[in-house]
């Protein structure tokens, strides 16, 4: 059994209590809201901004208004995954907060996360994410067993989610991790560039027996902008399949094959409705996976050799119905699609561990 490293008291003398890593890309407007909420927290922090898209005025604004923030212009845009790995590599604190630039921390959020982290030293901990109107954006994420990811508790009242909850997946928008555990897991997989890297990290953490928690007492506002374009669709689908191929056991993939085919048909249908650029993006998914097969196979081999949790446990809280309410704009259509496909997904589920949504 692979044991995670001890990670207490790693910080140098005088180091901050929490390092905060923010990866930016043409994000000045968001950063102007985000950074002051981090610096006003009631614990000692260091803020590290990795800029993947410079020349929007971010550097000059930070130099002028927040000179205590450490700014680093990336040599090239390696995406969200590489940017965060670079930032965490510079972190001096025992704990690091991964934070999106479009997130604002409410007062006391970071101290609450840190107290929870110290009480649960082998856990990764999400903040509760609210939309600007006060409704929930996410208390972590959910995953359908074919890899489609959705926001857990989207649109719920915050009153329905309090205290500490175990969650299936982290939302990468705001989570606290012991810095040494992040390094122990290898950080984000830079093959992903962006999208699903938080899902992959979550599943790899759970394969090692680590817990994922949402601390609903630590609240942040997430100004999430829902949208889709051909490049995003390509990355979402590529990284969804990449995650399944890396993480799941061979027997699980075989058992889930009918459901995986059904989801492939669904995503191809979506691409067909959206037009030629989406169809091209969907085809590029297979091409990329084939061209990079030696890379992800090597990662898969290493992951499978180190895992201590089997898929029956890993998928225990996975969804048995696709979250069409978050995938299509028409709620009537969403309900119709769920009624149509849910019986098939329940029938094809590789492990009979329930039929509903994760709690």
Image: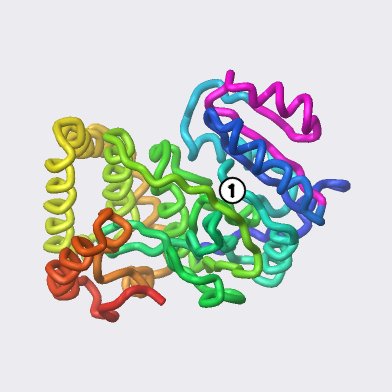
Q: Is residue 29 magenta?
A: no
Q: Which quadrant of the figure has residue 116?
A: bottom right
Q: Position of residue 354 (x, y in %)?
A: 28, 81
**The residue positioned farthest toward the right in the image shown:** 14
* Quadrant (top left, top right, bottom left, bottom right) of the C terminus: bottom left
Q: Is residue 62 magenta?
A: yes
In the rendered view, would you say 248 is above or below 245? below
Q: Position of residue 3 (x, y in %)?
A: 56, 64
Q: Which quadrant of the figure has residue 149?
A: bottom left
The answer to whether any part of residue 254 appears in the image is no
The answer to whether any part of residue 82 appears in the image is yes
Q: Which quadrant of the figure has residue 66?
A: top right
SS of the residue under disc 1: strand
Toward the viewer: 343 or 133?
133
Q: Position of residue 131 (x, y in %)?
A: 52, 56
Q: Residue at x 41, y 52 (%)?
A: 200
Toward the viewer: 287 or 72?
72
In the rendered view, would you say 234 is above or below 318? above
Q: Position of residue 19 (x, y in %)?
A: 71, 47
Toward the viewer: 256 or 275?
275
Task: Classify 10 Å Cα crowding around label 1: few (below 14), some (14-19), many (20 and above).
Answer: many
Q: Residue at x 73, y 43 (%)?
A: 36
Locate residue 115 relative to residue 1 in the image: left or right. right
Locate residue 250 relative to residue 152 in the image: left or right. left
- Residue hosting label 1: 103
Q: Residue at x 51, y 73 (%)?
A: 166
Q: Residue at x 13, y 58 (%)?
A: 262
Toward the viewer: 60 or 196?
60
Locate residue 40 relative to residue 228 in the image: left or right. right
**Total of numbered circles in the picture?**
1
Residue stretch in magenta: 44-72
Chosen colour scheme: rainbow
């Amino acid at each position: 059994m692979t044991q995670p490293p001890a990670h207490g008291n790693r910080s140098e003398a005088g180091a901050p209590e929490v390092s905060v890593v923010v990866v930016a890309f043409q994000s000045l407007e968001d950063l102007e809201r985000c950074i002051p909420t981090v610096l006003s927290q009631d614990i000692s922090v260091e803020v590290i901004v990795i800029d993947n898209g410079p020349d929007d005025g971010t550097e000059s604004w930070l130099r002028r208004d927040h000179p205590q923030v450490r700014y680093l212009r990336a040599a090239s845009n390696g995406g969200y995954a590489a940017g965060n790995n670079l930032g965490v590599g510079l972190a001096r604190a025992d704990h690091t907060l991964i934070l999106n630039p479009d997130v604002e921390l409410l007062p006391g959020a970071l101290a609450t996360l840190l107290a929870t982290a110290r009480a649960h030293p082998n856990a990764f901990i999400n903040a509760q994410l609210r939309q600007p109107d006060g409704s929930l954006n996410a208390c972590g994420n959910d995953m359908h067993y074919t890899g489609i990811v959705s926001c857990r508790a989207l649109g719920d009242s915050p009153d329905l989610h309090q205290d500490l909850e175990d969650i299936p997946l982290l939302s990468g928008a705001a989570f606290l991790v012991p810095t040494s555990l992040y390094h122990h897991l290898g950080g984000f997989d830079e093959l992903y560039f962006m999208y699903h890297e938080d899902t992959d990290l979550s599943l790899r953490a759970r394969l090692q027996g680590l817990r994922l928690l949402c601390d609903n007492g630590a609240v942040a506002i997430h100004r999430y902008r829902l949208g889709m374009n051909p490049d995003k669709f390509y990355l979402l689908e590529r990284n969804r399949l990449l995650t399944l191929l890396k993480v799941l056991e061979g027997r699980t993939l075989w058992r889930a094959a009918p459901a995986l085919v059904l989801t492939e048909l669904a995503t191809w249908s979506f691409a067909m409705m959206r037009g030629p650029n989406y169809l091209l993006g969907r085809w590029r998914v297979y091409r990329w996976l084939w061209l990079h097969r030696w890379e992800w196979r090597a990662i898969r081999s290493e992951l499978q050799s180190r895992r201590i949790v089997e898929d029956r446990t890993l998928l225990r809280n996975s969804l048995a119905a696709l979250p069409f309410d978050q995938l299509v704009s028409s709620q009537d259509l969403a309900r119709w699609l769920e009624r149509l496909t849910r019986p098939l997904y329940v029938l094809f589920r590789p492990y009979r561990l329930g039929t509903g949504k994760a709690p």
